Amino acid sequence: MKTILFFGDSLTAGYGLPTAQAYPSLIQEKLKEEGYDAYTVINAGISGDTTASGLYRVDRWLSAPIDIFVLALGANDGLRGIPARETSQNLQQIIDKVKHKHPDAQIILSGMEIPDIVPGRYAAEFRKLFRELAIKNNVAFVPFLLEGVAGMRHLNLPDGVHPNAAGQKLLARHTWTVLQKLLKKGD
């Protein structure tokens, strides 16, 4: 068996929804549909997680075998206005830990954005940090996990922040587009 670990926050956990509707579960379904039976998905999403708390908890997930590590943290950093440099450093340390413990694992970094209505340069710096990390570390990259979902009332729960079941399907589609290039049939 090959393991795909989704390491993220409430977006990964599927906040407010049954686990089966969270996008990692939808990816597991897609893997089965497409004949990638050797892959199993683990959802390590925790609501409210920041890159700092993710860095704190990542080690316990690295003791088990991992073939593909999907890093989907940063949304809460953006919401809290944590400096982009700090977010970048935390994500880099998580990537370093994964590479050290599982040198053959492939990594996907899911990018986050915050609305341009945020004053100053923060929104641009925040958006850029994910692209820069993906290039620097030569990892697969989902440019914006919430593309087409953020700000769309009909794709979010009443809180306007967390994707509903239909929104989660788009998160799965964005991730699948990148993930499928890393998969091997018959593995």
Image (cartoon, grey):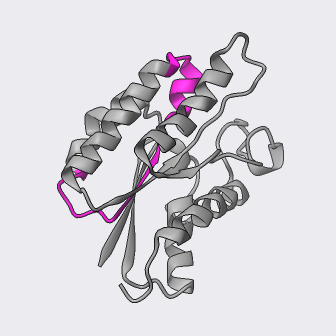
**Whole-percent x, y for residue 31 in the image:** 51, 78
Instruction: In the displayed orientation, state which residue is furthest to the top.
Output: 120
User: Seen in the image, is 149 located left or right of residue 184?
Assistant: right
Q: Which residue corresponds to the image point at 51% horizontal and 25% vertical from the top-left?
A: 77
Q: Which residue corresponds to the image point at 67% horizontal and 48% vertical from the top-left?
A: 163
Vertical placement of 69 versus 55: above or below? Answer: below
Vertical placement of 105 versus 109: above or below? Answer: below
Quarter holding the N terminus is: bottom left
Vertical placement of 143 versus 151: above or below? Answer: below
What is the quadrant of residue 170 in the picture?
bottom right
**Residue 73 covered by magenta stretch:** yes
Q: Which residue corresponds to the image point at 54% horizontal and 71% vertical from the top-left?
A: 180
**Residue 59 covered by magenta stretch:** no
Provide the residue span drawn in magenta: 61-84
**Whole-percent x, y for residue 33 in the image:** 56, 85
User: Seen in the image, is 31 located left or right of residue 171?
Assistant: left
**Whole-percent x, y for residue 99 in the image:** 27, 49
Q: Which residue corresponds to the image point at 81% horizontal and 43% vertical from the top-left?
A: 152
